[in-house]
Amino acid sequence: MKNVKKITNVFILIFLLTGSFTLAQDRAIHPNKLPKTAKVFLAAHFKGISVSSAIEDREIYGVDEYKVYLRNGMKVEFDSHGNWKEADGKHQKLPYGFIPVAIRNYTVRNFPNTYIVKIEKKRWSYNAELSNGLEAEFDRSGNFKKIDD
């Protein structure tokens, strides 16, 4: 009888785990379904570039993030509220309007023949990838911290 209970509990556990995985999934959405903040960001900083596809990354507790792919190949990721987390130009120059001024000024001054092709906003820092392959790390205020090559 104990073995039957153990086997039953194992099957219940497997069922619950696989059921929770099906709740956490990505799904394509219409760009109009993006949060207003994300739509305003795209209209302001990627003006004239239409959205190729938008993906909603759902977790058990709700939406975790949005991934937006633009027609020119660039990708922008947003948090669940529509605030940008990462912009990837896919080796193309990113528009500088949303990049903190201190980061823009530092890269223009210290790397005059390069441009930012990817930027990621983390909790306490920014990581910017330059067109020459270098990655620069900045603190939350945009002050330079270090270079990774």
Image (cartoon, rainbow, N blue to C red):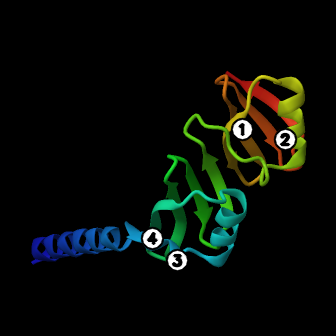
Residue in view at x 69 percent, y 25 percent: 134
Q: Are marks 4 and 3 in contact (CB under 8 Å)?
A: no
Residue in view at x 62 percent, y 65 percent: 79
Query: In the rendered structure, which disc, 4 or 3, sits on the residue that comes first in sequence?
Result: 3
Query: In the rendered structure, which disc, 2 or 1, sits on the residue that comes first in sequence?
Result: 2
Q: Nearer the viewer, residue 73 or 27?
A: 73
Q: Are marks 3 and 2 in contact (CB under 8 Å)?
A: no
Q: Are marks 2 and 1 in contact (CB under 8 Å)?
A: yes
How far apart are labels 4 and 1 at the CA level?
A: 27 Å
Q: Position of residue 109 (x, y in %)?
A: 90, 28
Q: Position of residue 94 (x, y in %)?
A: 68, 44
Reading the image, the residue beneath label 4 is 58
Amino acid on which disc 4 is placed: Arg
- Is the N terminus in the top left, top right, bottom left or bottom right quadrant? bottom left
Query: In the rendered structure, which disc, 4 or 1, sits on the residue that comes first in sequence?
Result: 4
Q: Left or right? Give the position of 60 relative to 144.
A: left
Q: Position of residue 46 (x, y in %)?
A: 65, 57
Where disc 1 sits, the SS reads: strand
Reading the image, the residue beneath label 3 is 32
Q: Is residue 69 above or below residue 27?
A: above
Name the front one of labels 2 and 4. 2
How far apart are labels 2 and 1 at the CA level?
A: 8 Å
Name the front one of labels 3 and 2. 3
Residue in view at x 50 percent, y 71 percent: 31
Where disc 4 sits, the SS reads: strand
Tell me, for residue 128, which label it has, or none.
1
Using the rendered view, name the quadrant where residue 53 is placed. bottom left
Query: In the rendered structure, which disc, 2 or 4, sits on the residue that comes first in sequence?
Result: 4
Q: Nearer the viewer, residue 131 or 22?
A: 131
